[in-house]
Image: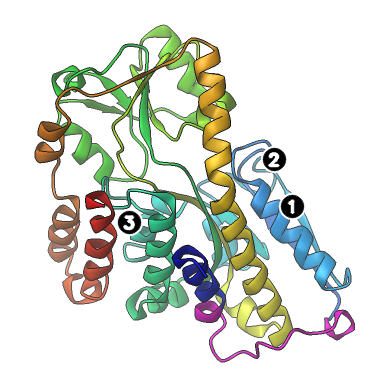
Amino acid sequence: MSKARTALCAIALAASAGFSAVPALANDYPAMSLRMAHPLPQSWPGVEWDLWWAEQVEERSGRKIDIEIFWSGQLGGLLEIKNLVSSGAVDIGVFAQAVHASEMPLTSIAAGLLNRVSADPATAQELARATYAAGPVKAELEGLNLMPLKWTVTSPYRFTCNKPIETMADLEGMRIRAVGGAYVPIWMEAYGSVPTRVQAPEIREGLQRGTLDCNFGPIEWVPFFDLQEVAPYLSDINTGAFTTFQLYVPHDTFMGWPQEVRDLMTEVAAEAMQKDLEALNGVEAKAMETFRAAGGQVVELADMEAFVAKSPDMIQVWVDSMTEQGLRADIEPLIPLQRKAAESFAR
């Protein structure tokens, strides 16, 4: 069994500790009708595994469990779904916990807020799993009435720009879309870039008009947003892989479900995340093919060693920030997890 597979199989064990591992028969499941709030359209890269999870839970329960997905923010927007789940207003919700870093400071670090920590999706996936399993994070989540079941990973975030980044100096003054909370802008500013808040639907227009020089995201977003013509230069700088959107249920609701339901949902979640991870290579290759076919170029950074040397120690930046907030004792178990993940950049 691969390291990635072992890690993902542990997700179900961590999330359902104390539950039976014996599969239930379909006729053992209670009839349940659940609503899932999803902020993204069904065509968004990676969300097919949220759909796969819901469909598999339905199928394996003998259709006793019905999950209706409300796509594109029908039940609530990106910033609203967290509170809808926490309050129990919806049974299941998908949101980006990174945008709620101030409300969930310990949990949010599981989304990979720090640049150049997880060099690849498998490392990002394992870092998230280990973070959710840490005692202080579990306590924070329970206090927020939230239980994470699965999360989505992407290929490494890179810069897709309307002009080439050939040397580190080219980053100076470039307006780059900044996402993921407070730490990404700090990292960008270290190179003289201008972090720019741009909503996803406005990325292409910003690049086309020149109010934005680069998108910051994985290559699979290029064909989705049709960026290949307005941003034909892809930098080879690996800024790190991140988990993006997380699927949550209310903690008290989850604990009130029968054991067989909890087991089913966590086991299918582990499988969905493994499939997501295994599919990424193909997704990345297909997106790159589309990018190159439109005339896109991959630009190698000539002074990569200098770029790496200049990169701030974002883990220490995070530690200092958490210490200032009086959370140093809470993050102690999390610091080694971040340091271990950062070793992936040395491999």
Query: Which x, y percent locates residue 34?
Result: 76, 65
Dominant secondary structure (helix, strand or loop) of the stretch shown in magenta: loop
| 2 and 1 marks in contact (CB < 8 Å) | yes
Numbered disc in front, either 2 or 1: 2
Asked if residue 314 lies in the magenta stretch, the reply is no
Q: Which residue is mark 1?
A: 69
Q: Amino acid at mark 3?
A: Ser
Q: How far apart are the alpha carbons under marks 2 and 1? A: 10 Å
Q: Residue at x 59, y 79 (%)?
A: 252
Separation of marks 3 and 1 at Cα, in angstroms: 28 Å
Question: Which stretch did the figure color magenta?
Answer: 13-29
Label 3 sits on residue: 102
| Type of amino acid at the residue the image marks with label 2 | Gln
Residue drawn at (59%, 63%) of the image: 85
Number of dots carrying numbers: 3
Q: In this rendered view, identify the residue nearer to me: 224 or 318.
A: 224
Residue 204 visible to the viewer: yes
Tell me the tag on residue 156.
none
Per the image, the residue denoted by label 2 is 42
Earlier in the chain: of badge 2 and badge 3, it is 2
**Amino acid, disc 1:** Ile
